[in-house]
Image (cartoon, grey):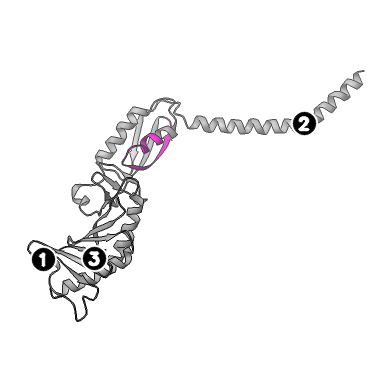
Amino acid sequence: MNALTSRLKTLIDERLLPFQGVLFVLCLVLGVFYLAFEANRLELDVNYVSVSGNLNPAQRNDALERLGEIVEKGTELALIKRKIESLSWVYRANVTRDWPDSLDVDVVPEVAVALWNDNAFINQDGSVFLSEFDLIPSQRTKLPQLYGPQGSELRVSNQYQQLNDALLNAGHSIDLLKLDERGGWSFKNQVGITVLLGKDELTQRVQRFLRVATYVTLKGRIDAVESIDTRYTNGVAIDWKESMESFEIAKTFNSEREQKL
């Protein structure tokens, strides 16, 4: 009887041996996950918080003020990261612990590449953000002004790049680009001339503007131009400043039938 019991015990142990290995690995994996979870929590008191990054004093103070509101024992680092990145002027943040009682927050601020409508900015990704810290007034005047309906910021930003690149080759640039509610485009160049492009054939209409602008410049009248409407099939219309009369230059303005300015 004892021999039979011993044999049965040996068989059971042999059959359970593979499962014991699996159980050990499972416990090891769960332990790693638990340690990772605990490492993401501030189980110890935080006595020191540092904020690094290319920030001005106002930005640094704003970040520290937000940290003072959210950092406490048991707070997850991921939550702190999300809260800091929720600040409108923050592009990205990285949060790490410096044992035993310090927290380091590296902040990357948003960088504006254009002004958006009347109260916001566009970053390098074509996303809109609000900020009172990122630029001093003298720097804001150097940025292009973009206008468009809500949700069109990426489209307007991309169109600005395409049109401005075409104009730069001819010595012009865009100070202001607008997409209206009906889908029509217009821009104001570096000398204050408003150019109406409409909805279609934007590249061809930009080239038409450049030909007319070159012609008017040669005539010494570029400073008298208020706006140029390129939406005509066979020509453009020039609106002159003050006492100058508005008239249309035909498609053949550079032929023998060109109108004298």
Secondary structure of residue under mark 3: loop
Give the quadrant of residue 103. Answer: top left
Relative to 103, residue 197 above or below: below
The x, y position of residue 32, in whole percent, is 58, 33
Distance (Cα) linking label 1 and label 3: 25 Å
Distance (Cα) linking label 2 and label 3: 80 Å
Give the quadrant of residue 78. Answer: top left
Secondary structure of residue under mark 2: helix
Residue located beneath label 1 in the image: 245
Distance (Cα) linking label 2 and label 1: 99 Å
For the image shown, how many numbered marks are present on the structure? 3
**Label 2: few (<14), some or many (≥20) within 10 Å?**
few
First reached walking from the N terminus: tag 2 or tag 1: 2
Q: Is residue 240 visible?
A: yes
Secondary structure of residue under mark 1: loop
Residue located beneath label 3 in the image: 172
Magenta residue check for 222: no
First reached walking from the N terminus: tag 2 or tag 3: 2
The x, y position of residue 174, in whole percent, is 25, 60
**Closer-to-camera residue (196/84):** 196
**Closer-to-camera residue (252/118):** 252
Question: In the visual, does 30 lie left or right of 250?
Answer: right
Q: Which callout, 2 or 1, points to the residue nearer the camera? A: 1
Region in magenta: 81-100
Relative to 17, residue 147 above or below: below
The x, y position of residue 237, in whole percent, is 20, 66
The residue type indicated by label 3 comes to His
First reached walking from the N terminus: tag 1 or tag 3: 3
The residue type indicated by label 2 comes to Leu
